Amino acid sequence: MLEGLLIGLQTAMSLQNLLMVIAGCLIGTFIGMLPGLGPMSIIAIMIPIAISMGDPSAALILLAGVYYGAIFGGSTSSILLNAPGVAGTVASSFDGYPMARQGKAGKALTIAAVASFAGGTIGALLLMIFAPMLSSVALLFHSAEYFALMVVGLSAIAAFAGTGQVAKAIVMTVLGLIMATVGEGALFNLPRFTAGIMDLQSGFGFITLAMAMFALPEALFLVLKPKVAGTADGEIKDLRITRSEARSIAPVIGRQSIQGFFIGVLPGAGATIASFLGYAVERNIAPKAEQEEFGKGSIKGLAAPETANNAACTGSFVPLLTLGIPGSGTTAILLGALIALNVSPGPRLMIDEPQIFWAVIMSMFIGNLVLLILNLPLIPYIAKVLSIPRNFLIPFILFFTLMGAYIGQNNATELLILVGFGVFATALKFADYPLAPLLIGFILGGMLENNFSRSMQLYDGVSFIWERPMTLGLLVIAAILILLPSYRARRAKARAQGVADGD
Amino acid sequence: MALDRWIALILLGICLVYGYTAWFTMDASLAPFMKRNPIWPSTFPKVLSVLAIGACLVILSGIEKSEPKEAEIDYRRLHEYKLGQAIVLLALMVAYALCLRPVGFIISTTAFLFFGSFVLGERKWILMISVAVIATMIVWYLVQEVLGIYMRPLPGIFGG
């Protein structure tokens, strides 16, 4: 481990990579602050740039920096304007915005920054401990287990989708898998489902799809319904927090870093769930007098979701780096970028290319430090971005989505596909279909089919499902994950109607 | 019928076409030696089509009830939002896609950024033009010189 740490430090401390962290954090903060643009859109827009750099560690460092920056920027806009740019920071506005209205915006930002820093750093420490452990287990996995594991991951995403949403999430996931079968697969060298259209020969472009699913609908929503932002009275001063305040939030930060991290590790449960859960838990265990404060500008109520969402962001890297299975939309996009750079994340990553793995972890520490010492003093100036008129902002967002899809393929048809899918995705968003499962399914589709085919060939049929106990166990877990929420919803409904149910 | 069930119906149609292709037409072109393989190119799509059709039917039949919740945008009152602007912007994106090759990057991008802000209601002409031109030039420089990706800058007749 020490050796790995040193390799990582060496890679991450190179001038180019340090600049990448700083640039990533700044860009992320900048764009993440704009209401309506989440980390997924920003990362999708940044991917063409990251891919054309050619160096996988630098690209991943840049994108990870953008990711934390976006979360940090999102919390800034939820504190200052009550307009969260990111779903994961909605909980921060519960107490952050009241603080800002009491004239304590500077203090709220400092608490947010310190809590994010602590959450991210403790998360990275836990990642350092757990990722190698998990990946040594994962090395025992066979293609049959990989297949089963991906099924578990995909069904977990559907299971966490919420009541009444499970079927929709399943449809979206399967639709993503279906879209991944379009084009020429590696295993068969046979074009499938292209309907004779040459442009579909190589399948749908992943960047195009990512843009169409996230960036374009969000931009269209901004057009349709201009967000009414609260008033921010420009002045941000008094960034200091007192010693007693620090003492009261320290245990909150400690608890929420660990809780947030483990929620982030679970597939499907990302920063959003972590931040809401963190807020709820801290409110419940706070003393009676402090409970009253929550929602009216409690520093604990701000520190809890801020810590939890950053720790969860770090946690979501665990399944990505050790199993090659993304747990959230954002890590799915990162996975796509890594595959485009010819790196296949998974248990072999730590052995074959340790410099990438460790450099990313090291850059997490550096990135958090950058956010704390570089971005915090700059916040009053960065907040000026909020005053860019939307008449100029929206054409630029649309232009960057178009450019991102075009640069990768140099094919104007891709742009038409982008617009078409973008409209479709907007309709799906109206009807409350979750979009992230589609992209995760699309990205995992190729791998899922390859592992499935490989095990079919090795066992000459589907007998691998019952001949390998681990595969069977994982598939059973997947089935339980899908069936449990609908069973529980049914029982809850029955109970609500006053029908006695067995227990 | 609510929008989500209409969408499920459309998706069901797509999945039925997909499933029909996978189950009935795809295997015809399979080479004889590949038929001895335990897995065919159509195996995985067959499984997927069954799953997708099943899940679409669950939504359509309304087995899984979801509580109606406050959506960010209520599609039933879509005309109350700035729908016209959104549609014109989408048309502008299509026009951009069609013009990018024949007209060249610089002119089409400048026009896109200019008309984009025009559609959204901006009327400060000089500011609009200068923002569009400067941004186009910066992006073109970055893509062409820094990233090294060729994009035809000018219309074809000027040898771009």
Image (tube, coloured by chain):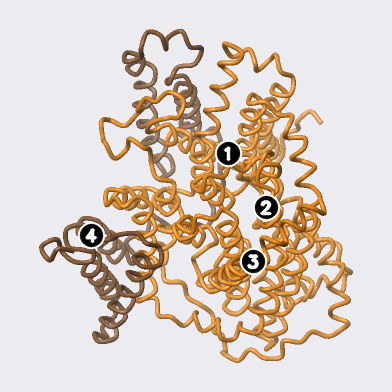
Chain colours: A orange, B brown
Please tell me which residue lies in front, A496 or B127: B127
- Residue B41 lies left or right of residue A325; in this view the side is left
Q: Which residue is mark 2?
A: A355
Q: Is residue B32 above or below residue B138?
A: above
The structure residue drawn at horizontal position 32% and vertical position 69%, both measured from the top left corner, is: B140
Read off the residue under disc 3: A14
Looking at numbered disc 3 in the image, what kind of residue is underneath it? Ser
Residue A440 shows in the view:
yes
In space, the residues marked 1 and 4 are separated at their CA atoms by 41 Å
Q: Nearer the viewer, residue B115 or A138?
A: A138
Q: CA distance from mark 1 to mark 2?
A: 39 Å
Chain hosting mark 2: A
Proximity of marks 1 and 4: CB atoms separated by less than 8 Å:
no
Q: Residues within 10 Å of mark 4 (few under 14, many from 20)?
A: many
Q: Nearer the viewer, mark 1 or mark 3?
A: 3
The answer to whether residue B73 of the structure is visible from this angle is no
Q: From the viewer's perspective, tell me whether residue A267 is left or right of residue B74.
A: right
Residue A166 tag number:
1
Residue plotted at (72% across, 87% down): A239
Q: Amino acid at mark 4?
A: Leu
Give the distance between the C-alpha atoms of the residues marked 4 and 3, in whole angstroms.
39 Å
Front position among marks 4 and 3? 3
Residue A414, given in percent of the width and then of the height, sits at: 31, 49
Residue shown at the point (63%, 41%) measured from the top left = A324
Q: Is the residue marked by circle 1 packed among few (<14), some (14-19), or many (20+) residues within 10 Å?
A: many
User: Mark 2: which amino acid?
Assistant: Gln
Pointer 1 indicates a residue of which chain? A
* Residue closer to the observer: A42 or A245: A42
Dot 3 or dot 2: first in sequence order is 3
| Circle 3 Cα neighbour tier, 10 Å, few/some/many (<14 / 14–19 / ≥20) | few
